[in-house]
Image (cartoon, rainbow, N blue to C red):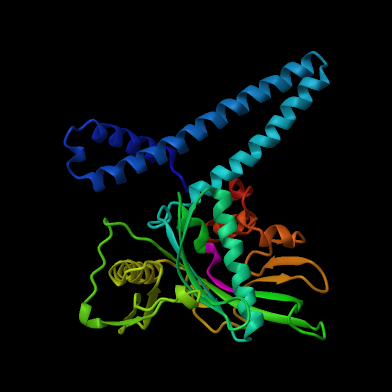
Amino acid sequence: MFDVDTATARLAELNNLAEDPNLWNDPQKAQKLMQERTSLENQLGGIGRTERELEDQIGMIELGEAENDEAVVLEAENALKALKKDVARQELEALLSGEADRFDTYLEVHAGAGGTESQDWASMLLRMYTRWAERKGFKIEYLEETQGEEAGIKSATIQISGHNAYGWLKTEAGVHRLVRISPYDSNARRHTSFSSIAIFPVVDNSIKIDINESDVRVDTMRSGGAGGQHVNKTESAVRLTHIPTGVAVVCQAGRSQHKNRAQAWDMLRARLYEIELKKREEQAAADQAAKTDIGWGHQIRSYVLQPYQMVKDLRTGVQTSDTSGVLDGDLDEFMAATLAQKAFGTAPGQIEDVD
């Protein structure tokens, strides 16, 4: 939980460091410190504004009641309701204080067994997360995409860059289940499809991950192309496989093998760092779900489009009938509930009831 006294002391320390003329001799260290400083200023400033707004609106209610002015009371009550929502948001921001939460993130989508159905579902999930990122104003970069035979995708990797991108999206790792009337079934039967989401942070230069090059197998291949005159005739795509762990990454975004190789090494370091993070975190059960079979018994969320409309998170119980909104990127409620559950075993807005 966000500790105001500790944060205030740390901000004072950072302000002193910011006045050191030698700070920018190390630009990477300086940038990291300034980012931390800005984050603490925003959090502490938000708490101060909340306290002042609360006092002001309580005063307005007392004034309205004293003068029997119902309009003033109603306006102040509405302002308090809005303030409550803002406090819930601040509670969530306070939960994003993990070692890697502030980092950008890689997001991988993998279709499960089921051919076209699962591959189409994988493409729907990819769109859902890109829409969520666009709503946040985050930057999206496509690193790898393998198309399905008839429709959809077999797999894809994107990089999402923005404040606390990994902290938010780490809640989405796992298997996602879709139930719908298949658009690919001429008999209009109901189908169940599975696809998995993997999330791992983009580590910066302050995080040192040592990898023995002899432990990594390097494979090159032709990147996927549009065909015809646009087909990629050179082996520019790169796959790295870390032999001790079995972790494999692929990058084909760049036109040159050199660029793709460098990006793939960054992705591999991020994957291995994520493994170390998970070893230190007490999340074994949830993390294991993201690494097991893509099928029954392992899903974290169900998306039912037929015979009724419902999206339900099986970890927190949060559900909604607004399936179109969720598939268009409206995921904050699910992410918030999972963050709060992991930290307190409760839902956002109820944190004050926890000792």
Q: Quadrant of residue 64?
A: top right
Location of residue 62 with respect to 12 vertically, above or below = above
Q: Quadrant of residue 296?
A: bottom right
Residue 53 lies left or right of residue 36; in this view the side is right
Toward the viewer: 15 or 30?
30
- Tell me if I can see residue 296 in this picture: no
Location of residue 190 with respect to 201 vertically, above or below = below
- Tell me if I can see residue 218 in this picture: yes
User: Which residue appears at 39% of the width and 38% of the height?
Assistant: 38
- Looking at the image, the residue that sits furthest to the top is 67
User: Which residue appears at 40% of the width and 55% of the height?
Assistant: 103
- Magenta-highlighted residues: 171-176
Residue 146 lies left or right of residue 98; in this view the side is right
Location of residue 153 with respect to 58 vertically, above or below = below
Q: Is residue 174 magenta?
A: yes
| Residue 71 at x, y percent in the picture | 81, 21
Q: Is residue 131 magenta?
A: no
| Residue 212 at x, y percent in the picture | 21, 77
| Residue 62 at x, y percent in the picture | 72, 20
Marks counted in the figure total: 0
Toward the viewer: 170 or 57?
170
Q: Quadrant of residue 15?
A: top left
Toward the viewer: 123 or 173?
123
Residue 123 lies left or right of residue 102; in this view the side is right
- Looking at the image, the residue that sits furthest to the front is 229
| Residue 310 at x, y percent in the picture | 76, 66
Toward the viewer: 204 or 15?
204
Residue 296 lies left or right of residue 155; in this view the side is right
